[in-house]
């Protein structure tokens, strides 16, 4: 992954994003920056615009105004497929895993490896052995401790299923991994398992956008926090230099960003 083509070391950048749904303005001139090698958390109350922002960055919706850049180059996503072609992988809350299929089959779902040879390509004969070998290698690389890649996803715990979904995104992303509430509905142990995997994804060289309502998790793992409020970006803060209570106060409107100490802003 190249991280130095943009002088500001920005992998992804958005300027002035606007998205309207009838009379409702979901995004009202939002800016966004994601640096190389960071976990950027996006937080906000319901209706703050964080979901609309993520949908725009992942190609799920087309902004009415504004522009998105990847490695300094303006891009126009018409669908999530366009974003995936640019190396942006998104894991939504519903995971989109197939419970009856094996872990290896889930990792390569929609990207199945076809056996070599003209006949195999014509008949789309899947190379299950190669997929299994690559699945083992990729899961080992991310240190995901699952006993067998041939077991069905439905036999896994919630945390393990989430790890499969995150590992799948990390295996194919070239630029950015976007995670929507990856620890929602998980217990403490399984939530920590997923957080550790997210760290390994970042350490592998992929910047991560993390959407979460879980403030302790956000403060534990994020390098910077983008606070969305009323369709705009309120500010970006450094979790090491701001309290959780002040962050929530800005998020809810109880405190203005200009009331924060200068060192809290990132």
Image (tube, rainbow, N blue to C red):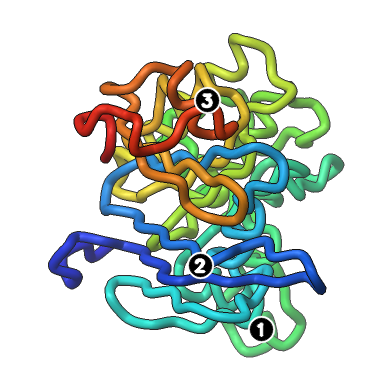
User: Where residue 58 sits in the image (x, y, percent)?
Assistant: 57, 64
* Disc 1, SS: helix
Q: Residue at the top extreme?
A: 188
State how far apart marks 1 and 2 are (Cα): 47 Å
Q: Is residue 184 shown above or below 2?
A: above
Q: Quadrant of residue 114?
A: bottom right
* Disc 3, SS: helix
User: Where residue 44 sits in the image (x, y, percent)?
Assistant: 59, 39
Question: Residue 66: in sight, yes or no?
Answer: yes
Q: Judge left or right: residue 119 versus residue 44.
A: right
Count of numbered marks = 3
Residue matched to label 3: 248
Question: Residue 102: in sight, yes or no?
Answer: no
Q: Is residue 61 shown above or below 165?
A: below
Q: Residue at the right extreme?
A: 100
Viewer-proximal residue among 175 and 249: 249
Q: Nearer the viewer, mark 1 or mark 2?
A: 2
User: Where residue 104 sits in the image (x, y, percent)?
Assistant: 64, 46
Q: Quadrant of the C terminus?
A: top left
State how far apart marks 2 and 3 are (Cα): 22 Å
Q: Quadrant of the N terminus?
A: bottom left
Q: Mark 3 packing: few (<14 Cα in 10 Å), some, or many (20+)?
A: some
Q: Mark 2 packing: few (<14 Cα in 10 Å), some, or many (20+)?
A: some
Residue 29 bears which disc, if any?
2
User: Where residue 68 sits in the image (x, y, percent)?
Assistant: 44, 74
- The disc, 1 or 2, on the residue closer to the chain's N-terminal end is 2
Viewer-proximal residue among 136 and 183: 183
- The disc, 1 or 3, on the residue closer to the chain's N-terminal end is 1
Q: Judge left or right: residue 115 versus residue 174.
A: right
- The disc, 2 or 3, on the residue closer to the chain's N-terminal end is 2
Q: Residue at x 57, y 49 (%)?
A: 168
Residue matched to label 1: 121
């Amino acid at each position: 992954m190249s991280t130095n083509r943009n002088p500001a070391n920005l992998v992804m950048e958005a300027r002035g994003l606007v998205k309207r749904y009838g009379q409702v303005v979901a995004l009202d001139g939002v800016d966004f920056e994601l640096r190389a090698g960071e976990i950027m958390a996006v937080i906000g109350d319901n209706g703050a615009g964080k979901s609309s922002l993520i949908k725009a960055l992942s190609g799920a919706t087309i902004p009415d105004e504004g522009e998105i850049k990847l490695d300094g180059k303006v891009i126009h996503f018409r669908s999530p497929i366009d974003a995936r072609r640019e190396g942006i992988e998104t894991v939504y809350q519903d995971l989109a895993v197939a419970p009856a299929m094996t872990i290896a089959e889930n990792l390569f779902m929609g990207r199945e490896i076809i056996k070599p040879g003209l006949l195999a390509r014509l008949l789309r004969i899947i190379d299950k052995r190669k997929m299994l070998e690559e699945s083992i290698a990729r899961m080992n690389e991310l240190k995901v401790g699952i006993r067998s890649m041939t077991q069905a996803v439905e036999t896994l715990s919630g945390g393990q299923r989430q790890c499969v979904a995150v590992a799948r995104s990390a295996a194919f992303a070239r630029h950015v991994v976007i995670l929507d509430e990856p620890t929602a509905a998980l217990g403490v142990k399984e939530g920590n398992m997923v957080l550790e995997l997210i760290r390994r994804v970042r350490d592998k060289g992929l910047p991560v956008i993390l959407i979460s309502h879980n403030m302790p998790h956000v403060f534990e793992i994020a390098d910077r926090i983008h606070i969305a409020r009323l369709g705009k970006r309120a500010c970006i803060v450094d979790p090491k230099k701001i309290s959780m209570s002040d962050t929530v106060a800005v998020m809810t409107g109880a405190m203005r960003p200009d009331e924060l100490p200068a060192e809290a802003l990132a």
